């Protein structure tokens, strides 16, 4: 089919980005996976267009987390002073992509993640150790 041979990626609960990477690879390899499934004597159905749209919408929602994880993983040491600003950046980006999303499932995922991110952010901002490096920095 003209694309390099790639394996599907399995989600690993302890790896932050594995869900994003798994879904991205599935979208990237949608046609070869569909062709392989339709050629097999299997009960596994090919993804519907609605399921593909849901996956694509969820990838858009998960993208801010992916970008932040990639940025942090490129550093040997991550300063505590980066944590709160990075979470605020994720919150802003997540709010934007959720508001723009036309996919109901993706929007629901975004709203759920925003709620939990805000709870974690509030906890971190209440912690004197984590908030010290960002005191005096405007929101």
Image (cartoon, grey):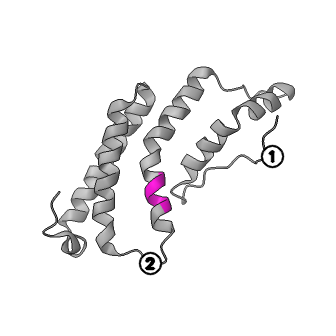
Q: Which residue is mark 2?
A: 77
* Farthest-out residue, bottom: 77
Dominant secondary structure of the residues highlighted in magenta in the image: helix
Determine whether 72 is above or below 22 in the image: below
Looking at the image, residue 106 sits to the left or right of residue 3; the answer is: left
The x and y percentages for residue 3 are 78, 41
Residue 67 colored in magenta in the image: yes
Instruction: Report the magenta residues as a range.
Output: 66-70
**Which badge, 2 or 1, comes first in the chain's sequence?**
1
Q: Position of residue 86 (x, y in %)?
A: 33, 60
Q: Please give left or right for residue 88 compared with residue 101 in the image.
A: left
Q: Residue at x 75, y 48 (%)?
A: 7
Mark 1 highlights which residue? 5
Tell which of 21 and 11 is nearer to you: 21
Residue sitting nearer the eye, 56 or 38: 56
Taking the magenta stretch, the answer to whether it contains residue 103 is no
The quarter of the rendered structure image containing the N terminus is top right
Binning the other alpha carbons within 10 Å of mark 1 as few (below 14), some (14 to 19) or many (20 upward) gives: few
3D distance between C-alphas at marks 2 and 1: 35 Å
Helix, strand or loop at mark 1: loop
SS class of the residue under badge 2?
loop
Tell me what residue is drawn at x 44 percent, y 29 percent. 105
Q: Considering only vertical position in the picture, is 83 above or below 101?
A: below
Instruction: Find residue 41 and report its horizontal and vertical position in percent.
Output: 87, 27
């Amino acid at each position: 089919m003209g694309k390099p041979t790639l394996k599907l990626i399995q989600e690993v609960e302890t790896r932050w980005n594995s869900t994003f990477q798994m879904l991205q690879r599935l979208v990237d390899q949608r046609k070869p996976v569909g062709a392989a499934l339709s050629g097999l004597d299997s009960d596994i159905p090919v993804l519907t267009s609605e399921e593909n749209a849901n996956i694509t919408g969820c990838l858009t929602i998960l993208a801010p987390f992916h970008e932040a994880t990639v940025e942090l993983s490129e550093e040997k040491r991550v300063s505590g002073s980066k944590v709160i600003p990075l979470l605020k950046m994720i919150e802003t980006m997540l709010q934007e992509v959720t508001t723009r999303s036309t996919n109901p499932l993706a929007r629901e995922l975004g709203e759920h993640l925003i709620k939990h991110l805000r709870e974690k952010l509030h906890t971190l901002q209440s912690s004197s150790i984590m908030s010290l490096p960002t005191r005096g920095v405007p929101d």
